[in-house]
Image (cartoon, rainbow, N blue to C red):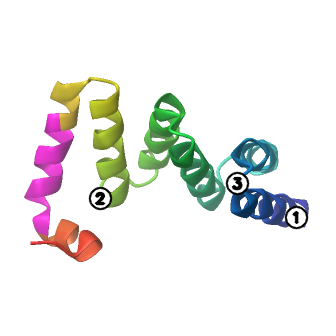
Amino acid sequence: MRVTELINESKAYFKSGDYDKAIQKLNHALIIEPYNYDIKKLLLDNYLLKDEFANVLDTVNDLLKENNNEIELLFIKAVCLVDLEELEEALKICSFIISKKKDFYSVYGVR
């Protein structure tokens, strides 16, 4: 029950634009349930909106341990790597995404 309360509180802070407090609540929830994928995804959303690319990259890498072929996460990782000027690694990830173009098209609706 406490985790649900923390998540709901974080969503309220997120909606009000107080990403720091939302992140704080989600980190508390992760202490209780450290392997909760959904909490990590919410944390990722907050870091993205704050442009905290190092934290985004850490969170994405953690999420990719559970699903290393998730196109959306790989795309986010590639974008972060470009922002962090790690272009060679970003290019490798983009090449992988392109090789999975059918999945990419279904996720992003592009051709």
Tell me, yes or no, if residue 68 can be seen here: no
**Image check: 66 left or right of 109?**
right
Which residue is label 1 attached to? 5
Which residue is label 3 attached to? 17
Tell me, yes or no, if residue 10 can be seen here: yes
Other residues around mark 3 within 10 Å, as few (<14) / some (14–19) / many (≥20): some
**Image check: 56 left or right of 7?**
left
- Give me the C-alpha separation between circle 3 and circle 1: 18 Å
Q: Quarter of the image holding residue 100? A: bottom left
Mark 2 or mark 3, earlier in chain = 3
Q: Secondary structure at mark 3?
A: loop
Which residue is label 2 attached to? 71
Q: Which span of residues is magenta-colored?
A: 91-101
Question: From the viewer's perspective, is the residue at label 3 or at label 1 nearer?
Answer: 3
Q: Main secondary structure of the magenta part?
A: helix
Q: Is 100 a magenta residue? A: yes
Other residues around mark 1 within 10 Å, as few (<14) / some (14–19) / many (≥20): few
Mark 3 or mark 1, earlier in chain = 1
Q: Secondary structure at mark 1?
A: helix
Measured as percent of width and height from the top left, residue 23 is found at 72, 45
Question: From the viewer's perspective, is the residue at label 2 or at label 3 nearer?
Answer: 3
Q: Where's the C terminus, which quadrant?
A: bottom left
Measured as percent of width and height from the top left, residue 11 is found at 74, 63
